Image (tube, rainbow, N blue to C red):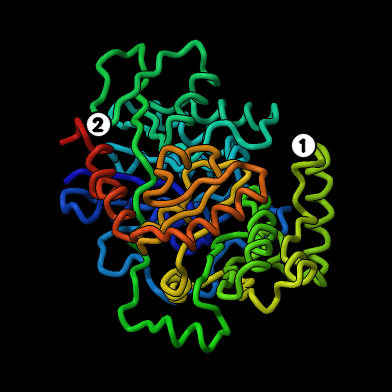
């Protein structure tokens, strides 16, 4: 029985990285030949960040029926816990430790943990890279990224773009790419395993759900476009709303369904603790972020009334509990991802699980995963007219949901786990 550690946010946390880490652990556990441990943060970020990161609304136990053991131990704000984390993992004597890398600010603690684990020659440290070059691309982000991920024995990437970013970050390293997981035999090389973002199986369609009744109860029209997930500027909800408004001018059979929590509006702003955090956080942002990258005032929802489409829009402006996720995908025709930039997206993976075609901008990895006219349609970035045209094209030429299954048939967690364990059988 091989022992594997999945380090990252445990299932009590909100967001795609928590879902991803949980899904990965479940895929490894399902094989039957692995003892799987999730080693998790207790607090993932500096205490001054004014946001609630814990999922306090979902009731479903995502680990029910598994043998996965979870340890919440790592506090970003307590360096002693970083050392304790490394000791705890080392004492487990795992063959592989898979570290989720999704934001540069975690570089300091993850560097400490990975460096200590590097001392054990029988532990393979894998960094599962959701990005390398962060969108802000600041010097401090690059510094923290390099500081942490240089301690990897192996890298996992979900898109070729991420491999190219690794080449840029480490120009003096020899990085060998494959898609099988076969480990390199040359100590002067580091392996980059190019895989994909697997299809989420945490959320399954509800066979009892009645989309016709749901539409009637919520005043939704025949055709429903879905925006789902945290409301962040890079996800382009402002583009989606403006493009939809143009479509709604021409057609009376369309609705826009927006489901997601405003990322920077999860705490009670009247509380003194929130005011103090917000003040300190604003000072930190001023020191490290360019003004254009500060999304504290980002409020695309104001466009709904401004553009006069409130009667065509259903807004669920909250964190969506696990139990409610399926209904929003099942009632929708297509999922809209008019992102400003993109790394492999959990929302994309979630959409595929419900066989929903994607309408996306041709940025990041989307041209790799979306065949225009087959499992989705691609629009020009920053071009609202073209985004609206893509939405209209979908209405005029809807895509067969089975095309989604064809495109994603090999993107399973089972295959993903198999590649991670290659050479460990």
Check the image and report above or below for 404 versus 163. Answer: below
Residue 67 circle label: none
Check the image and report above or below for 402 versus 322. Answer: above
> Horizontally, is 4 left or right of 135 in the view?
left
Name which quarter of the figure residue 372 lies in: top left
Tell me which residue sits at (23%, 49%) in the image.
Answer: 414
Tell me which residue sits at (41%, 72%) in the image.
Answer: 330
Residue 143 point in image, percent of width and height: 63, 26
Q: Earlier in the sequence, mark 2 or mark 1?
A: 2
Tell me which residue sits at (59%, 59%) in the image.
Answer: 230
Q: Where is mark 2, residue-wise?
A: 180
> Is residue 71 visible to us here?
no
> Horizontally, is 327 left or right of 178 in the view?
right
Closest to the observer, 320 or 360: 360
Q: Kindly report the distance in space between the C-alpha atoms of the residues bearing marks 2 and 1.
A: 39 Å
Residue 353 point in image, percent of width and height: 35, 60
Quadrant placement of the C terminus: top left
Closest to the observer, 220 or 364: 220
> Is residue 191 visible to us here?
yes
Closest to the observer, 219 or 268: 219
Name which quarter of the figure residue 255 lies in: bottom right
Tell me which residue sits at (55%, 61%) in the image.
Answer: 229
Closest to the observer, 239 or 79: 239
- Of badges 2 and 1, the one in the foreground is 2
Q: Where is mark 1, residue-wise?
A: 288
How many marks on residues?
Answer: 2
For the residue labelled by badge 2, is the local secondary structure a helix, a strand or a loop? loop
Residue 370 point in image, percent of width and height: 42, 45
């Amino acid at each position: 029985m091989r022992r594997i550690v999945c380090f990252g946010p445990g299932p009590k946390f909100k967001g795609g990285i928590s879902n991803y880490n949980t899904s990965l652990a479940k895929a490894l556990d399902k094989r039957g030949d692995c003892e799987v441990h999730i080693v998790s943060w207790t607090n993932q970020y500096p205490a001054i960040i004014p946001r609630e990161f814990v999922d306090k609304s979902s009731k479903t136990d995502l680990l029910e029926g598994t043998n996965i053991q979870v340890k919440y131990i790592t506090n970003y704000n307590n360096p002693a816990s970083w050392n304790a984390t490394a000791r705890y993992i080392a004492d487990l004597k795992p063959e592989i430790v898979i570290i989720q890398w999704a934001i540069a600010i975690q570089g300091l603690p993850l560097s400490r943990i990975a460096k200590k684990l590097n001392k054990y020659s029988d532990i393979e440290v894998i960094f599962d890279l959701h990005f390398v070059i962060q969108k802000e691309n600041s010097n401090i982000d690059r510094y923290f990224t390099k500081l942490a991920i240089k301690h990897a024995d192996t890298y996992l990437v979900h898109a070729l773009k991420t491999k190219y970013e690794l080449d840029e970050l480490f120009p003096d390293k020899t990085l060998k790419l494959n898609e099988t997981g076969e480990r390199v035999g040359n100590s002067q090389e580091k392996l980059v395993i190019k895989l994909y973002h697997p299809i989420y199986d945490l959320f399954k369609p509800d066979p009892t759900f009645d989309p016709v009744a749901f539409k009637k109860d919520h005043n939704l029209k025949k055709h429903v476009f879905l925006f789902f997930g945290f409301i962040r500027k890079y996800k382009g909800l402002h583009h989606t709303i403006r493009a939809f408004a143009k479509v709604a001018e021409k057609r009376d059979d369309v609705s826009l369904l927006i489901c997601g929590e405003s990322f920077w509006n999860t705490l009670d702003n009247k509380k003194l603790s929130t005011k103090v955090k917000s003040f300190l956080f604003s000072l930190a942002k001023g020191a490290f972020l360019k003004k254009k990258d500060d999304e504290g005032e980002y409020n695309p929802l104001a466009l709904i009334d401004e553009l006069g489409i409130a009667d065509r829009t259903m807004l669920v402006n909250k964190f969506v509990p696990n139990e409610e996720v399926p209904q929003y995908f099942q009632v929708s025709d297509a999922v809209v991802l008019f992102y400003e930039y993109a790394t492999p997206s959990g929302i994309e993976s979630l959409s595929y699980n419900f066989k929903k075609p994607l309408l996306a901008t041709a940025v990041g990895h989307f041209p790799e995963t979306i065949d225009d006219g087959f499992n989705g349609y691609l629009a020009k970035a920053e071009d609202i007219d073209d985004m609206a045209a893509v939405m209209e094209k979908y209405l005029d030429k809807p895509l067969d949901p089975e095309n989604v299954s064809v495109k994603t048939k090999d993107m399973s967690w089972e295959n993903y786990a198999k590649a991670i364990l290659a050479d460990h059988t």
